[in-house]
Image: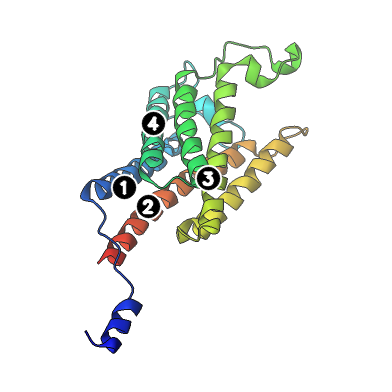
Amino acid sequence: MMPTEQKQAEAAPSASPPTPRWRRVLRWCIAILIAVAGIGYSSWVLEFLLPIPSDPTNTFLSQLAEKGAPFRWVFTTGDTVSGAMLAAAGIGGLLLFSRRRYSTIGWIALTCFGLSTIADAQWPIDPTVTHTYSETGLFPQLHQIHALTSSLAVFSIYIAMIAFSVAAFKYRRWPILRHTGLWILIVGSAVTAWMLIADNLPGNYGLGIAQRIQVGAMSLWLIALAVQIVVAERDSDRNAG
């Protein structure tokens, strides 16, 4: 080999080794689980199609699945299946993807969100309990198990959203989460602040609308995460080629 040819060979970027087939299959499985779970977590939109006497402005989504509610099985099934898919996807992400601090936190939080969602569906609100936490002096999380599981679910998904967003910026990867995912996180955080502030004020501030926007943002972010995993998989295959 001539010296010039040797220099050109050394300067040429080496192709990445092809990704094993089983890893590609698992990535696609994780992406599909997350995408389907994101859609299933939006089962609450069926309240506009089913004959349910609900007021979306002033009612919470938990009331759709409370004990004795019509069609509650539709919403509990949707949340249970979605939670199971997210828990499986979270564990799969931990085992498959590289172990970096913030992405690891994200996968753990996503798993916790899935498990909390399952618990949330299996321990619905009991409308027969008439006294409130203000009368007993207890936090709502100590008053009904559903309040605790709901709080854990919301906390877990926001930890996942924040952790993955930080990872996307810090590790300079997953651009969809740096752009679309970030805007979804901002909108979701804004309506969450709306709920937390308005819940402590007298009067009606459309808390039902705020919660539906919040949960809708969660579903959209999950779908964005799934799309990002698919896009990253295609990019890795292209680089390997």
Q: From the viewer's perspective, is 241 left or right of 153?
A: left
Q: Secondary structure at mark 1?
A: helix
Distance from label 2 to label 1 (Cα)?
Answer: 7 Å
Q: Kindly check if marks 2 and 3 are in contact, taking CB atoms under 8 A apart as contact.
A: no
Which badge, 3 or 4, comes first in the chain's sequence? 4
Q: At which x and y percent is residue 64?
A: 49, 27
Return the x and y of residue 163 as percentages of the image width and height.
Answer: 55, 46
- Tell me which residue sits at (28%, 65%) in the image: 238
Q: The C terminus lies in which quarter of the figure?
A: bottom left
Residue named by callout 2 = 229
The reply to whether dot 2 and dot 1 touch (C-beta < 8 Å) is yes
| Amino acid type at mark 2 | Ile
Q: Which mark's residue is nearer the viewer, 2 or 4? A: 2
The residue lying furthest to the right in this view is 202
Q: Quadrant of residue 144?
A: top right
Query: In which quadrant of the rendered image does the N terminus lie?
Result: bottom left
Disc 1 from disc 4: Cα separation: 23 Å
Foreground: disc 2 or disc 3: 3
Q: Which residue is mark 3?
A: 101
Q: Mark 2 vs mark 3: which is more N-terminal?
A: 3
Label 1 vs label 3, nearer the camera: 3
Which residue: 65% across, 16% down? 142
Residue highlighted by disc 4? 78
Q: Image height check: is 223 above or below 110? A: below
Q: From mark 2 to mark 3, how far is it between C-alphas?
A: 18 Å
Amino acid on which the number 1 mark rests in the picture: Arg
**For discs 3 and 4, the disc positioned in front in the rendered view:** 3
SS label for mark 2:
helix
SS type, badge 3 = helix
Location of mark 1 (residue): 27
Task: Give the CA distance from mark 1 to mark 3.
Answer: 20 Å
What distance separates the C-alpha of mark 2 from that of mark 4? 23 Å
